[in-house]
Amino acid sequence: MSKTPLLDGLKRYARKRVVAFDVPGHKQGKGDKTLIDVFGAQSIQYDFNSSYHLDNLGNPSGIIHEAHQLAAKAFNAKHAFFMVNGTSMAVMVMILASLKEGESIIMPRNVHKSALNALILGGAHPIYVNPQMDKQLGISCAMDADDVINTIQENPHAKAVFINNPTYYGLVTDLQKIVDVAHHYGMKVLVDEAHGAHFSFHEDLPVSAMDAKADMSSVSLHKTGGSLTQSSLLLCNESMDYHHVLQTINLLQTTSPSYLLMASLDVARAKLQDEGHEMFTKIMELSNYARHEINAMGGYIAFGPDRIGQPGIFGFDHTKLSIHTQGIGLSGKKVYDILRDEYGIQLEFGDVSNVLAIISVGDRSLEIERLLAALQDIKERYAQVGQSQSIQEFIHPQVQLSPKQAYSRESEMVDFSQSCGRISAEMIMAYPPGIPILSYGEVITQAILDYISFGLSNDQFLMGSHDPAFTTLKVVKED
Amino acid sequence: MELWYTEQQTEHVRFSIKIKQHLFSSHSGFQQVDVFDSVEFGKFLTLDGLMMVTEKDEFIYHDMIVHVPMATNPNIKKVLVIGAGDGGTVRELLRYPHLETIDMVEIDKMVVDVSVEFLPQTASQLYDEKVNLYFEDGLKFVRSKVNEYDLIIVDSTDPFGPGEGLFTKEFYSNCYRALKAEGILVNQHESPYYPAFERNMRRAHQRISEIFEVAQVYQAHIPTYPSGHWLFGYASKGILPINKHVNSWHEYGLKTKYYNPALHVGCFALPSYVIESLKEDYHD
């Protein structure tokens, strides 16, 4: 069994039966048993605050430091940092630690909101690369490595490249190739590895960011690695200055981090080291079995490694189970809703054409069989004559102001029809394919207005606007 | 020294049997499997500590899960049995010589192996030539079957272990497709008395009613099951559970300890509180 210094430290501290005249005020449930009744004695017993014996996340030198070092080793990184404000914060730290105000970063257009938030905070300029599309499936894929490399060559002044790897659907880009070229141009490579916490633990999974020698990576250990929700890891290679990264973390992170979240990271890391290989072998078996059975039903497409080689699909994460549902005439959202309401089965999400199931260490073949039986039944009972999907192309954005400049200026609401030529002060996302149509600081063009109008009349989900009816748009006030 | 088997039937109710010998104990990968020997109930099998079958009272359960549907339709030729690893259901089915094939699907091979070794009273005919044994998930087996069976018997554990999938809409619905036009589904239907069992009963009944044209419930008295009052579900695409064939059942010349045609008619008469409870909508 791998060591768990943080968990062990908590146990030791609990055994000391220290009289607590410090926070948290529940005092491990001594006075009021409510929390113990709800969450169990053990978890409340370990809900301590930072102290001499328990180290300090803001400047670790004891058990947290030890746990960080073990995590770094497990993920083949130089440094690891425990995050208790989610992977969103880890993503923000990567960007804020790598770029100064006014510097440029190359990133995919469908970047996570947390990355855009970091631009608002830090003042970096985005240079967008459109991810590739799979038109049959109606999804956005990864960025094609050649598209990224072209953008690097066209923008040699950029300081960093940001990559989502893998995508939500488990598609990966040629990370190694991008890292090599970016480093040649002196750019840092920052990887949002939120859905790839398991990559370091099995040779049949795509290469991890640290193995590819990227500079930083944000790993959502709670998603596929087994730790508690909201806990996450930030990983760095030797190119990053430890103290600078720690200082950036302390700009954003709470000074009262939960020891339950941190201990769960410690325990999950040890478990992954000891049993990860076996676990992910089993998960891939389950997922590959489900894919095979679903494809045999007809109508559905449970897509997988067969699509490797298409633009934007360099590799595939076999643990993911994505199912294209348009072949039975139902949207992914509809299948997602039917599974939840009629069969008591909750999937990760459903969009216009696909549903996604997360297969993890918690799953057994019993649950997989339920999903398969339900999908078969839905096909028999609900299938309709095929409906067409309409997937639009990306519109290349014209970034006029940095997101920070646009965010910090005065804004106003203007009539949708009068907004052409103005600069957006909001972000509008379209699902599918999950890309921003407009973001802070971008020029509103007629093509964008047409896109929104089309989306509204075709039941596309448009999210993020201040005015959900789209009679007005929020724009930067002109001087 | 005294050794007692105790089943925690509810949070506040326990049921105990004095044990002569603990004959077998192992985890199968699916569940904990145990066999005991006792004075009062003979040998008995438990799964995850819950009573499945005893030598003394198994005749009640197996009579009722087999002879009720078999009496309603003399043309049953092909039967699918899901669960039933102890073999008692198959034993009773094989008493009808006109029956041609029994496909039996048990997820846990250890249950069959242990029953063959320790409970020959129920398991002795599991390897009969009319029986095809499949060791896989019933949910998976039935998914690919269309218009194939005259009768499906779901002889499952409770819906909070490996048997959970056999109480779902997807399962009943796939069973419907696996049945022929005259097909019948009979299932272990939990109990009306203790609240946790009563919820399972209502949920199963509601789901089956949504799918099958005929969905009724019948009862039996089984001393070793929680509350002793146990139910079975009878569902079909049209054949009613009480019909002209039931009175001709004597012609098979079968001797049974519990079942008879008068009881067949009577067992569909339910206590008022059970009728009321089955009428209530189930909400999770």
Image: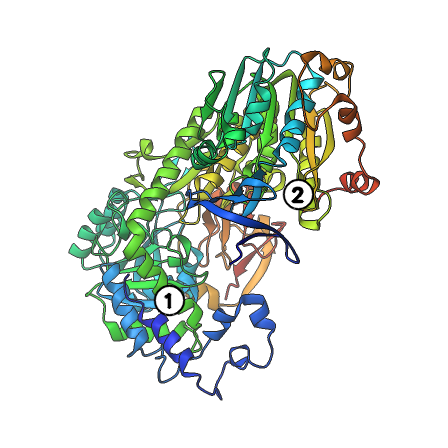
Of residues A260 and A464, the one nearer the viewer is A260
Helix, strand, or loop for circle 1? loop
Residue A159 lies, in percent from the top left, at 25, 61
x, y percent for residue A37 = 59, 69
Q: Which mark is residue A363?
A: none
Tell me residue A84's x, y (percent). 42, 68
- Which amino acid, by three-letter code, is at mark 2? Asn
**CB within 8 Å, label 2 to label 1:** no
Is A191 on the left-hand or right-hand side of B200?
Answer: left
Separation of residues labelled 2 and 1 (CA atoms): 58 Å
Question: Element at badge 2?
Answer: helix
Q: Which label belongs to residue B200?
A: 2
Nearer-the-camera pick, A409 or A206: A206
Looking at this view, is A330 or A6 the one in front?
Answer: A6
**Does A348 sit above or below residue A467?**
above
Position of residue B177 relative to residue A145, above or below, is above
> Label 1 neighbourhood size at 10 Å, few (<14), some (14-19), many (20+)?
many
